[in-house]
Amino acid sequence: MSDKRRALPAVDTLLSHPAVVQHGAGHRLKRRALRELLTAERQRLVDETSAVPDLDSLAYAGVVHIEWLSRSRAPSVFNLTGTVIHTNLGRSTLAESAVMALTRAACEPLALEYDIESGRRGDRDHMVEALLCELTGAEAATVVNNNAAAVVLALSAMGAGREAIISRGELIEIGGAFRMPDIMHASGCILREVGTTNRTHAWDFESALGEATGLIVKAHTSNYAVEGFTSTVEERELARIAHHHGVPFMVDLGSGALTDMAALGLPDEAQPYESIEAGADVVTFSGDKLLGGPQCGLIVGSREQIERIKRHPLKRALRVDKLILSALEATLLLYRDSDDIAADIPTLRLLTRSEAEIAACAERLAPALAGALPADFELSQRPCRSQLGSGALPVDRLPGQALVVTPTGERRRRERRLRELEQALRQLPRPVVGRLHDGALWLDLRCLVGAADETAFIQQLGALQLAQATP
Ligand SMILES: *Cc1c(COP(=O)(O)O)cnc(C)c1O
């Protein structure tokens, strides 16, 4: 037994193998990878039936391990889940100009908090404030880490120690531990819920207003719908009631589109300018949902309230860095200047893809996928419905096309084979994430765009490690 282990080569021998020498990694990483490989081999050889691998095989295994060690724990994936703005897969990808701006900011010093005109210290919001004001009609604007942070900061600045009045129908949870009642509590506000789950009236707000009131809040109930016998109070009316009592009115929009979604053939989505027009003092929305920019939370509104928010100590703790601000500025410039916003913002591009275009992609990929699958799987191309994701109405679905892989055979075996398939696709160099539905794996092709990605998808299928069916 120990002899077999002694037959393993030394680290230095493997280091001078041509396959290892050729690899571009540094010496330190190579040595670590080979040491780990040899330790694992020694373990394996404890079992007397194991054979000592030859030098070439070990060197190639070493190269694979070097790759594995230097690989990111969050590799790029193919998002074939059918959810376009997928929080677990990083939400929006950035427009080309935003990527360039971000890269420039990463590589070179920039006038972040520096006024080029006067040579004095400046405010980092200056990069995007004028753009945000132009795009939303607001007087002032600021940016924080995400929309949850925007809501916490705005509530803290305007309502800490006082009552925040909100309709019972809007005490939302949007997942990932964002629950409106908890957020209010964390912000130091006293939650004052009014109305009922399905109906809230203006007089509910009127009668709740008093000495203790800090502000009135409206939250966009983006990820669920109350239908039937319902009634909510319009923003214009809420703003009027709030201002009559001398308190601010805040709207948490969630997604907040900066262009008319309906004009792009998509489900209608509230735009920040509408809330500002209706009289909201503060509107908050996400940067990486329908806007299609980097993760951040945008706060727009009246000069008075935005100044209050900017002065709050939490603002400093929640501020965004130069990379985010640069990417955001470039994205907002597209909203101001682009002749074809649906083509320039990747998220909008994905959402507006036609079913015919997706079907053509499915037809190009189907033969390669069919060829890579063991004989006990069936492949079909079917119409499907994609979701916008990230809090957009789950009932609004976009028509698309999917490649659907269905295992055949007896039920228990079908379940096992489906799990094996799903796992094998996840273990590809660029993992493929689909959606299990109705005893099949659905690969919604809405988010697989462009010849380069199609080729990459097809090429890596050769590495699919899925055993033939065992009887
Ligand atoms: C998504 C959402 C949030 C949280 O935004 P993040 O950018 O994810 O922090 C808050 N409120 C509403 C209504 C939302 O839809």
Image (cartoon, grey):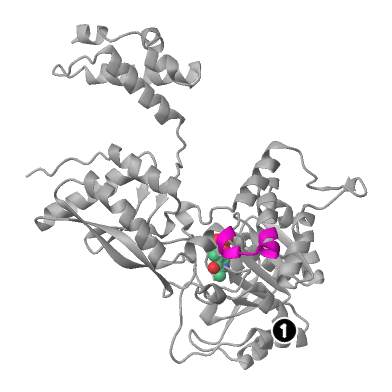
Quadrant that contains the C terminus: top left
Q: Please say whether residue 338 is one of the residues in the magenta stretch.
A: yes
Circle 1 is placed at which residue position?
242
Residue 130 horizontal/vertical position (percent) = 78, 63
Residue found at x 85% / y 50% = 122
Residue 274 horizontal/vertical position (percent) = 67, 78
How many numbered dots are placed on residues in this image? Answer: 1
Residue 416 horizontal/vertical position (percent) = 18, 50
**Image-based side of 413 in relation to 256, left or right:** left
Residue found at x 70% / y 82% = 278
**Magenta region, main secondary structure:** helix
In this orientation, does residue 434 appear? yes
Q: Nearer the viewer, residue 97 or 190?
A: 97
**Image-based side of 176 in relation to 8, left or right:** right
Residue found at x 46% / y 75% = 224
Magenta region: 333-344
Q: Nearer the viewer, residue 77 or 308?
A: 77
Residue found at x 21% / y 61% = 439
Q: Identify the image quadrant of residue 249.
A: bottom right
Q: Identify the image quadrant of residue 211.
A: bottom right
Q: Is mark 1 within 8 Å of ligand 1?
A: no
- State ligand 1's quadrant: bottom right
Q: Identify the image quadrant of residue 51.
A: top left
Determine whether 204 is above or below 18 in the image: below
In this orientation, does residue 215 appear? no
Quadrant that contains the N terminus: top left
Q: In what element is the residue under mark 1?
A: helix
Residue 192 horizontal/vertical position (percent) = 61, 79
The kind of residue tagged 1 is Ala
Q: Please say whether residue 206 is one of the residues in the magenta stretch.
A: no
